[in-house]
Image (cartoon, rainbow, N blue to C red):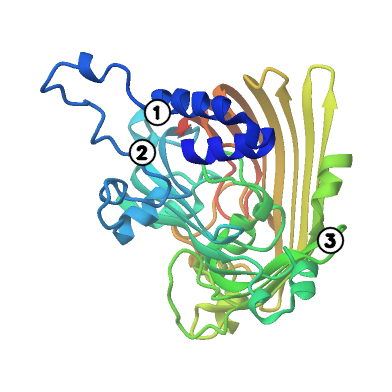
Amino acid sequence: MAEQASTAWAWRTGGCAAPVAALLWGALSYAAADPFTDAKPTGVVDPFAEVAPAATSGESVAGALGGPAEQSSLDRFLGDNFTLKLELMSQFSVSDAADAWEDVYSRQSAGFEVLKRFSTRTATVASLNLQARFVRRDHYLPVINDMEGEDREGWCGELHNAYVDVYNVFSPFLSDAGQAASIGRYNLRVGRFYLPMGLNLQTDTHGTLLQLSNDRNLGFERDWYAGFWGALNEHLNYDLYGLLGSGSDLVFRGQDGMLGGRLSLGPRYLREYGLEGGLALLCGERLSQHAVERSASVRREAQDGRVVDTLRVGPDLRYTRLVPSGTMTWTTELTAGTDEADEVFTQLHQLEYLNRSRRWGTALQYRRFWQDFERDPAAMPGGAMTGAAGDAADASLVGEVTWYFRNDVGNTTLHWVKLNVEQQTERQYGDPETIVSLQYYRYW
């Protein structure tokens, strides 16, 4: 390098600058040499001689030290875009119809959620969601957030979410221009998740006491299905799925399943106006023990006494507005349809307030499920009706107060205590009850 520098200097100054070139050559040669060579003690080893640069993403330690870069499949799965969330819940509920404090309903659970994204250098191509709980129940009560627990006394493992999303699934078959035009439009979902009916697809009610209407309306709020979701344009999103119609269990007992679809407002309406909403349709066949037990006509017409012809259609709306001290939210879900020949109509209305500190909130909900059914008192567990029973509807007014220890935007970390009071106002079978629930919940 010193030779190149002297040649360049000679070229720039002409052939008459030989003395200057000689001096420069000497200076560069001296600078290139270590002036302290003779001052170094013998036997000293550089302590950093074997240190390699830090391994970059995707490299193993062996690769960073010059060996082959190897990662196991498990290391790759857990290493990139992987999140493990944990969950604890403790709930106690008591009814004014209970005989003694020994009949207090107890629900204790520990759970987890796995979130995983699969990505290339330029895009996320798929994601996985797996959410499960291990639950202990004692002295079951029909609380609104545990309708599926009636037959699960004692210990039970529960699978809540288990699905895979594949994004822009048709992109490999499209031109570059077609890929750009279809981003976010055709996404495939396979597995178990919320029904495409009402606001549940946009609302995580996994840990809350207040629930939306699908659980009471259809007997389950989640099902196994496959189909597509995405954005039709900047104004509308869509969900379109073929559902198994079995609810909690992945079983086939002769049902044809259901077709479910929902058109919903695009995200710009939430950002600009605080609006969420849509119109949904669900039709086909489902398994529903409660629908068969509740109505003699449904039981008589249901295939094999368990497969119920089902139709539901209805709108939903949620409006969120900032107020001086926090946020107010109004939610409405309406559905009409049939179970076999029985007409049904479900309504849910909810008003929520969240203080701007995000430390506390309150909510009031009214829910009602009406059915024009043929009554059979002996059909329901417990036998004949008593007291004020015999209404055409199940209805409740529910009030709730929440104190948040942690309430992150986006629900990434949640930690609360809730007090919930449900006053049943109408009952198709049995007497109306007052149920008081206290819940501790943490998700992190």
Q: Residue furthest left?
A: 43
Q: Point out residue 228 in the picture as x, y percentages from the top left corner.
A: 66, 71
Are dots 1 and 3 in contact, CB under 8 Å? no
Residue 312 visible in the snapshot: no
Q: Looking at the image, which residue is at 36% across and 38% down? A: 53
Q: Point out residue 163 in the picture as x, y percentages from the top left corner.
A: 50, 63
- Residue toward you, 367 or 379: 367
**Amino acid, disc 2:** Pro
Q: Quadrant of residue 217?
A: bottom right
Q: On residue 193, which mark appears?
A: none
Which residue bears the numbered disc 1? 32
Which residue bears the numbered disc 3? 236
- Horizontally, is 328 left or right of 439 in the view? right
Are dots 1 and 2 in contact, CB under 8 Å? no
Badge 2, how many Cα within 10 Å: few under 14, some, many 20+?
few
- Residue toward you, 43 or 330: 43
**Amino acid, disc 1:** Ala
